[in-house]
Amino acid sequence: MTGSSRIDPLAMAFAGIAERYDRARLPTEPAPIEWALERFGLDGDATVLDLAAGTGKLSTVLAPRVGRLIAVEPLAEMRAILVRHVPAAEALDGTAEAIPLADGAVDAVFVGSAFHWFDGTAALAEIHRVLRPGGGLAILYPHARWQHNGWNQEVSERLEASSHPASRPANRPGSGRWRLVFDDTDLFEPLESATFPTTPEMTVEEFQLLVSSWSRVAALPEAERASLLADIAAILRRHGVERFPLEAANEVFATRRRP
């Protein structure tokens, strides 16, 4: 095992909201997982690593589709929920920069909504190490947008008016900056991608819960976080909203390990 086990300080906010995170985040859809497994030529005998597995949203879908599932997650609070949801997974303490597995241990590595937290260069070196030659790396990001709603600007302005706990720009997955490391590596082939649209709906309470699970909101002092969430609910209800549709999609990026 190589690399550093450092965890981004802002990501540590998830430790205190593990149960809330688990309730708030949408479940992982099977279609992007099956697309990646098919691309890698993997079947029910494969050994797969779910890296930065969180509470097991991705592991829940992977477990019945692979032969052996290893889930690596650094936060004990998240890992405890994962074990509850996916008892078949081998849950291990570790980070993307220090994966507790032997060289060439897995056929594929899956990362769900987490690569932007990694030290990209160190993580790719570790992922390359634990993959067998030609093994696959899949990175999944769900996108849920509500900009088409009339209340979006007011909600955005209220969010911007709140405190901004320090974070690296690369920690914002929507910026796409996490992908830049793939332009500078010879360890992996160029990324391919596929997008799978979904059409979920969300209530005001579910939207509050989702916002509260964002790292920058979870890191706020309790009183400030409560005020922000109450104001967001008030904005939506002032617009007559109790339930609204999301413009959602699951995007999956895939690549293979070079020798």
Image: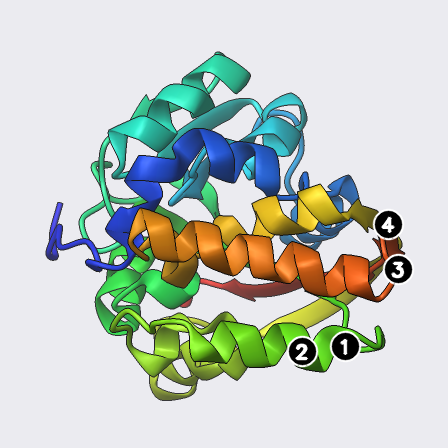
Q: Residues within 10 Å of mark 1 (few under 14, many from 20)?
A: few
Query: In this picture, is 80 found above or below 198?
Result: above
Asked if the residue under mark 1 is in contact with the one under mark 4, i.e. CB atoms within 8 Å, the reply is no
Question: Marks 1 and 3, how far apart in space?
Answer: 16 Å
Which x, y percent locates residue 198?
85, 55
Asked if the residue under mark 3 is in contact with the one under mark 4, i.e. CB atoms within 8 Å, the reply is no
Which x, y percent locates residue 85?
53, 18
Question: Marks 4 and 1, how far apart in space?
Answer: 15 Å
Tell me how the rendering is colored: rainbow
Identify the mark nearer the N-term, 2 or 1.
Answer: 1
Q: Which residue is mark 3?
A: 240
Q: Residue at x 32, y 58 (%)?
A: 128
What residue type is disc 2 on?
Glu
Identify the mark nearer the N-term, 2 or 3.
Answer: 2
Q: Secondary structure at mark 4?
A: strand
Identify the mark nearer the N-term, 1 or 3.
Answer: 1
Q: Nearer the viewer, residue 112 or 81?
A: 81
Query: In this picture, is 173 found above or below 176?
Result: above
Question: Marks 2 and 3, how far apart in space?
Answer: 14 Å
Nearer mark to the viewer, of 1 and 3: 3
Q: Residues within 10 Å of mark 2 (few under 14, many from 20)?
A: some
Q: Which residue is mark 4?
A: 243
Give me the disc on residue 147: 1
Report whether 8 appears left or right of 118: left
Q: Which residue is mark 2?
A: 154
